[in-house]
C-alpha cells in the first residue's frame, strides 16, 4: 500500500505554496485536492512527504508541474448537448440584440467549450461581432487552447454531441484532420483571447453578457465559491447570463436573489444589479 | 463488530437487482447513511432515484456537492462524476479522469470514504465486469474498515467480486439474498 498524504500534510504544503509562490489553494475542496496531490506524489515516485515538500519549496519548475497536474483538465466539446441546445434557442437570440458580444469561459482548460461556443455563434451569424475570452489558472492548457488542435479520436463523440445540440451542418467542416489530430478553423480561433487567470486571486478584467464556468466551482469550498460568484456578478452586465456545470448551483450563493434560472438548465440571468 | 458510520455500496453490471433487494429494508429510521456508487450507462440517467424510491420509504437522493451526510438517507452517485468525502463529512463531486473506465469510480468513493471514516466504514462490492472497487476495498481494509463482497457464485457477473475475494482479505462473502438482513443487523449493532 502506498503512503497516503494526510490532510495535515496537505495543509502544510498549501501554506508553503501560498507563502513561496502566492498561489492560494487553501480554499479548494480538500478531498479532490488530496487525491490529485497523492497522484502526483506517486507518479513522481517521491520516497517521502518531506522530500516532496522540499522539492516544491525550492524548485519553481517543479511547482509549475504541480499546478499543471493538480488542476483537473477534463473537458469535451458540446458536453451536455441539451445545455448547448438551450444556448442556441434561448440565449443567443437575446445576445444577438447587442452590438458587440463578450463571453468569458472561466476555467476553460484546453478550450473545447470555447470552440463549441464559437461554432454556435458562427451558426447564429454572430461570430463576427463576438469576442470569446478563455481563462485558466494552468498556463499549459491555455497554450493548448490557443492552438485549437484536438485528438481526431474524439471527433465522432463531438459530432454526436453536435447533432444532439441542434447542429445541422457537417461537424467535420469545422476542422482539418491530419493523422490523429484535428485542427479547428482559424476563423473560430480568430475571435478568441486566451490568458491565464486565477479565480482565487485575480480581479475582474471586463464586462460580459455571458459567463460560463462549468465544473470548476465543485473544486472550491463554499466560502471560495461565494467569492467567485461575487467576481462573476461584478463582471456580468445587468441581464447577462451565468452558466454553471450540471451539478453546480447558484442556490446557496450570496447573489442568488438577484438571478433567475432559465428553465431546467444550469443557466441564470442577472435581473438586478447589486445595490 | 460495531456500527459503521457510513455504508458505501459499489456495483457494476448485474448489481441493480441486488440493490433493488436491499433498498426495501432501508427505512427512514435506518441509523447509518448509505452511499450507492453504480456504474451505469447514460440510458439510466437520473431514473435510479425514481426506481429505488418506489421500493423504500427512506429519502433517496442524488449526491449534491458540499451536502452534509445524514443517516436515514440513501445517496446515489450522479452519472459522470466521482463522489468524494470531505473531512467534515460532506460530499464533494469531481469531474477528473475516469478510473477503470468509470466515472463515478467505486475505487475513488471507497478510498475517499476510508480516509475520513477509517474503521467506522463498511463497504460492499457487488456483481460487475471490471476491477473497479478492488483496490479501494484493499485500502478500506488496511484502514480497519469492514469489507463485504457479494458471493461470486450468486453474482450475475462474477468478475468484480471474484477479483476482490482473491485479492482482499474480505470479512464477509454473502449471497444477494442474505445482504438485506446483514445490512440491517450491521446498522443496528451497538456503538462499541
Image (cartoon, coloured by chain):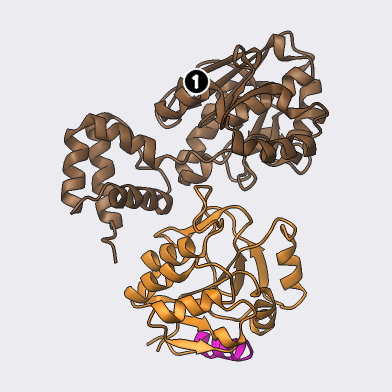
Chain colours: A brown, B orange
The residue drawn where x is 32% and y is 74% is: B142
The residue drawn where x is 42% and y is 24% is: A202
The residue beneath circle 1 is A204
In-front residue for pair A65/A90: A65
Provide residue A171's location: percent of width, then percent of height.
Answer: 74, 28
Magenta highlight range? B176-187
In-front residue for pair B6/B182: B182
In-front residue for pair A169/B86: A169
In-front residue for pair A153/A119: A153
Left or right for A254, reference A169: left
Work out whether B122 lies above or below B80: below
Provide residue B65's location: percent of width, then percent of height.
Answer: 55, 53
The quadrant of the picture occupied by the N terminus of chain A is: bottom left
The quadrant of the picture occupied by the C terminus of chain A is: top right
Residue B51 in magenta stretch: no
Left or right for B180, reference A146: right
Amino acid at each position: 500500500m502506498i503512503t497516503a498524504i494526510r490532510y495535515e500534510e496537505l495543509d502544510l504544503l498549501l501554506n508553503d505554496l501560498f507563502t513561496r509562490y502566492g498561489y492560494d489553494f487553501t480554499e479548494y475542496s480538500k478531498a479532490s485536492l488530496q487525491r490529485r496531490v497523492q497522484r502526483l506524489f506517486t507518479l513522481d515516485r517521491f520516497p517521502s512527504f518531506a522530500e516532496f515538500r522540499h522539492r516544491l519549496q525550492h524548485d519553481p519548475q517543479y511547482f509549475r508541474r504541480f499546478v499543471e497536474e493538480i488542476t483537473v483538465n477534463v473537458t469535451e466539446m458540446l458536453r451536455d448537448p441539451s445545455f448547448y441546445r438551450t444556448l442556441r434557442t434561448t440565449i443567443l437570440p437575446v445576445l444577438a440584440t447587442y452590438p458587440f458580444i463578450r463571453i468569458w469561459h472561466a476555467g476553460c482548460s484546453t478550450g473545447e467549450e470555447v470552440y463549441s461556443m464559437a461554432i454556435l455563434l458562427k451558426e447564429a451569424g454572430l461570430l463576427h461581432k463576438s469576442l470569446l475570452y478563455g481563462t485558466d489558472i494552468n498556463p499549459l492548457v491555455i497554450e493548448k487552447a490557443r492552438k485549437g488542435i484536438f485528438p481526431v479520436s474524439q471527433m465522432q463523440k463531438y459530432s454526436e454531441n453536435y447533432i444532439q445540440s441542434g447542429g445541422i451542418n457537417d461537424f467535420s467542416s469545422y476542422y482539418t484532420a491530419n493523422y490523429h489530430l484535428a485542427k479547428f478553423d482559424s476563423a473560430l480561433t480568430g475571435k478568441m483571447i486566451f490568458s491565464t487567470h486565477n479565480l482565487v486571486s485575480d480581479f475582474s478584467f471586463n464586462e460580459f453578457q455571458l459567463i460560463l464556468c462549468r465544473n470548476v466551482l465543485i473544486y472550491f469550498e463554499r466560502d471560495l465559491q461565494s467569492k467567485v460568484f461575487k467576481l462573476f456578478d461584478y463582471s456580468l452586465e445587468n441581464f447577462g447570463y451565468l452558466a454553471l456545470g450540471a451539478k453546480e448551483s447558484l442556490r446557496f450563493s450570496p447573489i442568488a436573489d438577484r438571478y433567475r434560472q432559465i428553465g431546467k438548465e444550469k443557466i441564470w440571468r442577472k435581473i438586478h444589479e447589486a445595490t | 463488530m460495531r456500527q459503521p458510520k457510513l455504508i458505501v455500496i459499489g456495483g457494476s453490471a448485474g448489481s441493480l437487482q441486488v440493490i433493488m433487494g436491499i433498498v426495501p429494508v432501508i427505512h427512514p429510521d435506518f441509523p447509518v447513511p448509505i452511499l450507492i456508487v453504480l456504474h451505469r450507462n447514460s440510458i439510466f440517467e437520473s431514473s435510479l432515484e425514481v426506481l429505488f424510491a418506489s421500493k423504500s420509504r427512506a429519502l433517496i437522493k442524488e449526491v449534491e456537492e458540499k451536502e452534509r451526510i445524514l443517516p436515514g438517507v440513501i445517496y446515489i452517485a450522479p452519472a459522470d462524476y466521482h463522489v468524494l468525502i470531505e473531512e467534515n463529512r460532506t460530499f464533494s463531486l469531481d469531474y477528473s479522469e475516469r478510473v477503470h473506465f468509470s466515472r463515478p469510480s467505486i475505487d475513488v468513493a471507497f478510498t475517499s470514504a476510508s480516509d475520513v471514516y477509517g474503521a467506522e466504514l463498511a463497504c460492499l462490492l457487488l456483481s460487475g465486469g471490471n476491477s473497479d472497487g478492488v483496490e479501494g476495498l484493499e485500502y478500506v481494509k488496511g484502514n480497519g474498515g469492514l469489507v463485504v463482497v457479494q458471493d461470486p457464485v450468486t453474482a450475475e457477473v462474477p468478475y468484480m467480486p471474484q477479483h476482490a475475494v482473491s485479492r482482499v482479505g474480505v470479512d464477509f462473502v454473502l449471497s444477494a439474498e442474505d445482504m438485506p438482513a446483514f445490512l440491517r443487523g450491521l446498522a443496528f449493532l451497538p456503538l462499541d
